[in-house]
Amino acid sequence: MQRTHNELQNELRKLLIAKYGASAVKQEEDLIDLMVHLGDKTLLIEVKSSPSAVSCIREALGQILQYSWQIGLHGSNVRYVIVGSSAAAEEDIAFLEYVRRETKLSLAYCTPKTFPAIDTQPLALTSRQFSHPPSQRPF
């Protein structure tokens, strides 16, 4: 059964608070699902409940860019993270890599379970930096 947006968001929020503390984690501020302030770095997180990773990525891209623009976040200190319920298939990964190349954004896709691998990577992340096999990659 597909988990709802709120269930995904709340599951990830608990993980983030456990790792960074409640003061670093913002939920539904400026319409942004989740945002984590880590000193001069920010994770801007958009949660999607679509059944496939590529659908989540397509749905979230415009939103996260607009939110980033609205609140003045830009540059190398921002990581855009799209969170869905489904693991990314090879085609999804290829699409995400294409978007990264074309936009030069630090963009990741993950599920709540694979999120810990995302936020430990440098902000200039590329898919080649991951040691996970394709079926376990957190993007």
Image: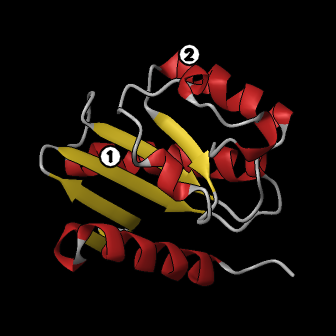
Sooner in the amino-acid sequence: mark 1 or mark 2: 1
Is residue 103 shown left or right of residue 110? Answer: left
The vertical placement of 76 against 62, above or below, is above
The N terminus lies in quadrant: bottom right
- For label 2, the residue is 101
Point out the residue furthest to the front here: 131
* Residue 99 placement (x, y as % from top left): 60, 25
Instruction: Identify residue type, mark 2.
Output: Arg
Residue 94 vs residue 58, the one in the foreground: 94
Residue 101 as seen in the image, left or right of residue 96: left
Residue drawn 32% across the image and 46% down it = 68
Point 56% across, 52% down: residue? 82
Q: Which residue is mark 1?
A: 68
Q: Residue at x 24, y 35 (%)?
A: 77
Q: Classify 10 Å Cα crowding around label 2: few (below 14), some (14-19), many (20 and above).
A: few
The x and y percentages for residue 67 are 36, 52
In-front residue for pair 61/129: 129
